[in-house]
Image: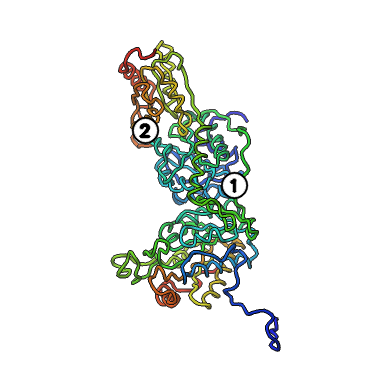
Amino acid sequence: MARRLMEGSEAMAEAAIACGCRFFAGYPMTPFTELLEHFAKKLPDVGGVCVNAESELEAVGMTWGALATGARAATGSTGQGLSLMQESFAEMTLAELPLVVFNMARGQGDYFQSTRGGGHGDYRHIVLAPMDIAEAVEHTQLAFHLADRWRNPVLVYGDYLLAHTSEAVDVSPVDFGPVPAKDWAVDGSLGGSGRSRSVSSLGIGKHGNLGPGIEAHFQAMVPKQEAIAAAEVRVETGFLDGAEVVVIAFGTAAKFVRYVVRQLRDEGVPIGYVRPVTLWPFPYEAVAAASEGVRGVMVFELNSGQMVDDVRLGVLGRAPVQFIGGISTDGSGFGVGDLLDVDVIRGRIEAALSSFPEGARA
Amino acid sequence: MTFIPTDAAPSAPSRKVGDFKPDLLLTQEHHLCPGCGEPLALRILLETIQELGVADRTIAVPGIGCYTSFSSTIDVDLVQALHGRAPSVATGVKRMLPDRCVFTLQGDGDMVNEGLQEVIHTAARGEAITCVLLNNGVFGETGGHMTATSVIGQRTKTSLDGRDADYHGYPILIGNLLAQLQGAAYVARGSVHSAGAVAKTKKMMHKAFETQLRGGGFSFVEVLTMCPTGWFIPTADGPGYMDDTLGQVHTMGELKAR
């Protein structure tokens, strides 16, 4: 398939449908609205269904039902709408449903929500943070693959910039390898056979095959999440050779940071960057390696400093960590603020550079 | 017609209705209280599915309440929903598998309190599923608290002197509410407090599922069920109490049939 100039929202919907998503439910909310519009327009043409749900609670519930039949299905919203879905996110993880969630976020203030979750109990979602539309297309398809592979929800962290800008992209299906058969799904055919199935978060099956029960089921999820954490770390690094300072950023902000780092390197400043591509699992080892012997580590993110927590856990005292980002939106609170600007980011990096102690590198 | 010979002793001991277990029940064991009406309602439901011959294309979506213990004993494919969320989950199931028979099973706390908007919108959409409500006017599982269907004067642990309209507000007659919606094709309220009521409710259940199976739209059966534990009355008084209290407000009958 040839590349086509598309708005990010359209590209992500196209990519989802191209890899087999046949159900979507959502509730309009800026800047997620266009993603819902594109699913509503495109899904019926491929025999799929898009429901304009009465609220985010029902959107995620409908997606739950669709997933239980074995279909590839997704929902989404902004972080605000995802706040309403958290109860279901927690339970769907325990029900081992391959949910894909799009957070077309208003900025980067949903880092904690994405990586820690607002729901109850012990659960984690894989979180993919694309930096541009081309990567958002790849991540959309990867999200469905990883969800099926691990039977665990995957969240794609988009934003206003991804939703509303355009790039020429190719959305044709990518082969990420085989995924397990959905031999757990229900189709209604086993009633009366004595072998009917349950899709449940409670670890409780049917009489005669009752399953592990709640405690053992919850315990069994722990090694699974550890296996995901070990297998699915994705990270991009650049200019770390000889770097005396490192900047860490994710998502669309990271693309701006990367541009500034390249500029500074061209001018002879020994600076490198780390971009967590998965926010969970977080690339602690890459951050640890990058922080070894440097004068300092900067964190740029468009919030009050949420990823800083994870960066500090990776750095573990090897170097000073300084937050150089901040909350930044346009007047509506939905869009891009003044901070997401190459010159502003450069200014903040240069100010931090002079504040770190000299000559830390051995 | 079967003739019963009266000129010889019966070849087998006589059996009561209660001796028969629906084929779609994996075990007769349950952990519900003596006098509970929910097993009776479940029996009506399972017999209906069996009699309509759709057991091998049915998906159940139960919510959370005492009746959730049936999730592991009914022999139909099942998706367990959260408290309040069964109609949306069932919607997702039905939209992906439109030729299957899909029903929800919820209590009054689940449907009329926690997830009221779910059933209203599902009915309004004319979603081709059957929603079954087990209405006992009380949160049974938590031990007897007021729900949106508790009647005026009803004593619960959160309305100790009886439900007072000025303080607690009025009960919601959910069947009547749903019957007004254009998308709702069949709406009825039955009960299991007497043999006659069970027979009538069974007919309602048949009509509801038949509505779904012929593509008629959304169908709804509310079944009033006894909860002597949550009503704080002697077990044997359950049926009579229900007839005198809940049954006087949530009156039995077909509310809509098209």
Q: SS at mark 1?
A: loop
Query: Could you tell me if residue B162 is visible in this image?
Result: yes
Give the quarter of the figure containing the N terminus of chain B: bottom right
Spatial CA distance of label 2 from label 1 is 35 Å
| Residue A106 placement (x, y as % from top left) | 40, 36
Residue A118 position by quadrant: top left
Is B108 in front, or is A292?
A292
Q: Residues within 10 Å of mark 1 (few under 14, many from 20)?
A: many
Q: Amino acid at mark 1?
A: Gly
In primary-sequence order, the first of circles 2 and 1 is: 1
Q: Is residue B100 left or right of residue B7?
A: left
Residue at 46%, 48% in the rendered image: A88
Q: Give the vertical position of B92 relative to B142 (above or below).
A: above
Q: Amino acid at mark 2?
A: Gln
Residue depicted at x 34% and y 17%: A353
Q: Residues within 10 Å of mark 2 (few under 14, many from 20)?
A: some
B25 sits left or right of A255 in the view: right
Chain ID, mark 1: A
Here the colouring is: rainbow
Tell me where residue B106 appears, x and y as whole percent.
48, 61
Residue depicted at x 41% and y 16%: A271
Letter of the chain that mark 2 sits on in the rendering: A
Please say if A168 is above or below B77: above
Q: Number of marks in the image?
A: 2
Q: Which residue is mark 1?
A: A70
Residue B110 appears at what percent x and percent y?
A: 44, 59
Please tell me the numbered disc located at residue A306.
2
Q: Residue at x 41, y 19 (%)?
A: A292
